[in-house]
Amino acid sequence: MSDYYAQLAEKLQSTLQGKIVNVEQGNGEVTVIVTPENLIDVSTILRDDEKFRCEQLIDVCGVDYSEYQGSMRPDERFAVVYHLLSVGLNHRIRVRTFAAGEMPMVPSVVDIWSSANWFEREAFDMFGIVFDGHPDLRRILTDYGFIGHPFRKDFPISGHVEMRYDEEKRRVIYEPVSIDPRDQIPKVIRDDHRYMVAEVEKVK
């Protein structure tokens, strides 16, 4: 990690002490881990404090850790990650918070960065994460009648329903999925040059 980001991590740890869980460093990046209860306070400091000046929110995304083999706890299945940019100081800061509970929920940061509006709607649509205080939390990519949240690890690859336009009814209708599950096991092994390299490597 560069000296600049190492120093930035120290400033974050010192300024946000008592409001954050941890500051992680790696791959030349800094990540601030914060609880949902402190998200608004920490975000406001990162925007307004002269040491950080994160004027822009570049992206908000959801994460599903349900199949992650690390040290995540069961109540840490869903996380929301915020990518912040300081134009004036030319640095980036990542903020991560975990949305716990039956209905994963974190506060909306729309009042801090207006660009969060559509990003939060996307995370709500794809992951089912609720952003408390969002002015218009609706689906943004799927249809209003869509069932489930496609980016969750337990969502079936083929989905639950399929839709088509019915000429007789003159409207879009929903039906059970008619796609057969795809078999991932190859049925044909071809005897040609594509396997020659592998065989030569075995002999070596």
Image (cartoon, rainbow, N blue to C red):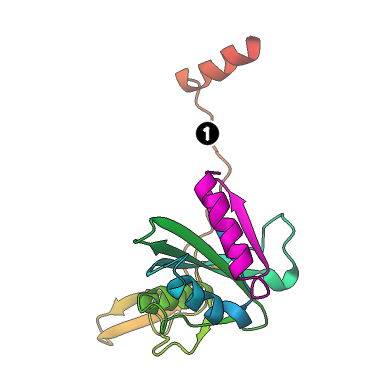
Q: Which SS class for mark 1?
A: loop
Kindly identify which residue carries mark 1. 188
Which quarter of the picture shows residue 34? bottom right
Which quarter of the rendering shows the C terminus? top right
The vertical placement of 1 against 131, above or below, is above
Front-most of 93 and 135?
A: 93
Would residue 162 be found to the left or right of residue 105 on screen?
A: left
Q: Which is more toward the observer, 34 or 101? A: 34
Picture coordinates of residue 55 (x, y %)? 37, 70
In the figure, is residue 164 to the left or right of 13?
Answer: left
As drawn, 2 above or below 112 = above
Query: Which segment did they paint magenta?
Result: 1-30
Horizontal and vertical percent for residue 90? 38, 55
**x 44%, y 77%: residue:** 120
Q: Residue at x 53, y 45 (%)?
A: 3
Above or below residue 76? Residue 186 is above
> Amino acid type of disc 1?
Val
Can residue 104 be seen? no
Up the image or down, 186 lies above or below 200; here it is: below
The answer to which quarter of the image holds residue 87 is: bottom left
Q: Residue at x 42, y 67 (%)?
A: 54
Q: Quadrant of the N terminus?
A: top right
Query: Does residue 41 belong to the magenta stretch?
Result: no
* Residue 43, horizontal then vertical, whole percent: 50, 75
